[in-house]
Image (cartoon, rainbow, N blue to C red):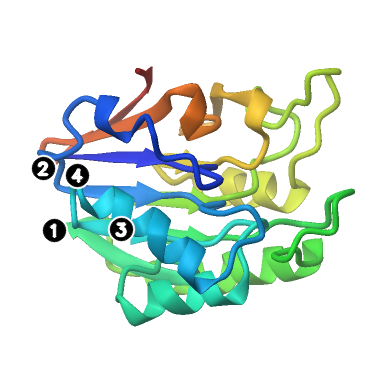
C-alpha cells in the first residue's frame, strides 16, 4: 500500500493530473497551505480538485489557511491537525499544522511554545502504534528542509527537538518553498516536497512491516 503526500498548494492544482499513481493511492495527505489566506470556500475548491483524482484525503491547515479552511476539513472528517489516524495496522499518522510567526503576518501563526505543546500533546494520542509518521507543516531547524535561498535556517527548534526525542519513521514538512529536499534526524527521514506547483510530492510505501518514502517530482 502507498500514500501520496504534498502541500503548499496555494490554490494551484494544475499539476494534480500529472502526479503518477494519485488515483490508485490508498490515500492523499495534504501537509498544509491549501490556500492564499483563503476562506472556507477556497479550501473546499482545492480539496474538491484533489478529490476528483482520489477522494481518500487527510489534510491539515498551514499558516496561509484561515479557520474556515480548518472547519471545512473537520466537517468532512479529513483533518489531521492535532489528531492521530491509523493508516494501517501498527502504522499511525499524526498531524500538526500552522507555523510560528513569519514576517508576513499570515492567518495561521502561533508561538513556538504553542507549537511545542501541540506536538507533545498530539504525540500522547499515538500510543499503540509500532511506527509513526508525522506531518508537521513547519520544518525542523538546521536541516536541508528549512533553508531559505540566502542560506538562512528558519525552521523550528521545537520541531527538531521533538523529532530527535520521538524518532518517528518519517516526518513530512513544508512551509519553506525553496527548501524542497530530504534530510535525516537520527533514524527519522525528513522530507519537504516544496510547492505542489513546482511538481514535488512524497510517495510513502508500507509493506506491512517497513515504511519507505521518496521525494519525487512530476
- Rendered residue at 42%/76% (across/down): 72
Residue 85 visible in the current orientation: yes
Height in image: 167 above or below 83?
Answer: above
Height in image: 185 above or below 66?
Answer: above
Labels 2 & 1 near each other (Cβ < 8 A): yes
First in sequence: mark 2 vs mark 1:
1
First in sequence: mark 4 vs mark 3:
3
Judge the density around disc 2: few (<14), some (14-19), many (≥20) Cα neighbours within 10 Å.
Answer: few
Counting from the top left corner in percent of width and height, residue 83 is at 42, 71
- Distance between the Cα atoms at labels 2 and 4? 25 Å
Mark 4 lies on residue:
53
- Rendered residue at 66%/50% (across/down): 159
Mark 2 lies on residue:
208
**Residue closer to the observer: 52 or 204:** 52
**Residue closer to the observer: 90 or 11:** 11
Q: Secondary structure at mark 4?
A: loop
Amino acid at each position: 500500500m502507498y500514500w501520496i503526500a504534498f502541500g503548499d498548494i496555494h490554490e494551484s492544482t494544475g499539476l494534480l493530473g500529472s502526479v503518477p499513481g494519485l488515483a490508485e493511492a490508498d490515500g492523499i495527505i495534504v501537509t498544509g497551505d491549501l490556500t492564499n489566506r483563503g476562506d472556507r470556500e477556497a479550501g473546499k475548491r482545492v480539496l474538491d480538485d484533489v478529490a476528483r483524482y482520489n477522494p481518500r484525503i487527510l489534510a491539515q491547515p498551514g499558516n496561509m489557511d484561515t479557520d474556515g479552511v480548518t472547519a471545512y476539513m473537520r466537517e468532512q472528517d479529513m483533518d489531521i491537525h492535532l489528531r492521530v489516524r491509523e493508516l494501517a495496522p501498527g502504522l499511525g499518522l499524526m498531524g500538526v499544522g500552522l507555523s510560528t510567526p513569519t514576517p508576513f503576518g499570515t492567518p495561521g501563526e502561533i508561538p513556538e511554545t504553542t507549537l511545542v505543546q501541540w506536538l507533545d500533546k498530539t504525540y500522547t494520542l499515538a500510543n499503540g502504534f509500532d511506527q509513526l509518521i508525522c506531518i508537521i507543516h513547519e520544518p525542523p531547524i538546521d536541516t536541508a528542509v528549512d533553508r531559505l535561498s540566502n542560506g538562512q535556517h528558519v525552521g523550528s527548534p521545537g520541531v527538531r527537538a521533538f523529532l530527535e526525542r520521538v524518532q518517528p519513521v518519517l516526518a513530512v514538512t513544508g512551509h519553506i518553498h525553496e527548501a524542497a529536499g530530504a534530510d535525516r534526524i537520527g533514524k527519522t527521514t525528513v522530507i519537504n516536497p516544496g510547492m505542489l506547483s513546482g511538481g514535488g510530492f512524497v510517495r510513502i510505501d508500507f509493506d506491512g512491516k517497513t515504511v519507505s518514502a521518496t521525494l519525487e517530482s512530476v
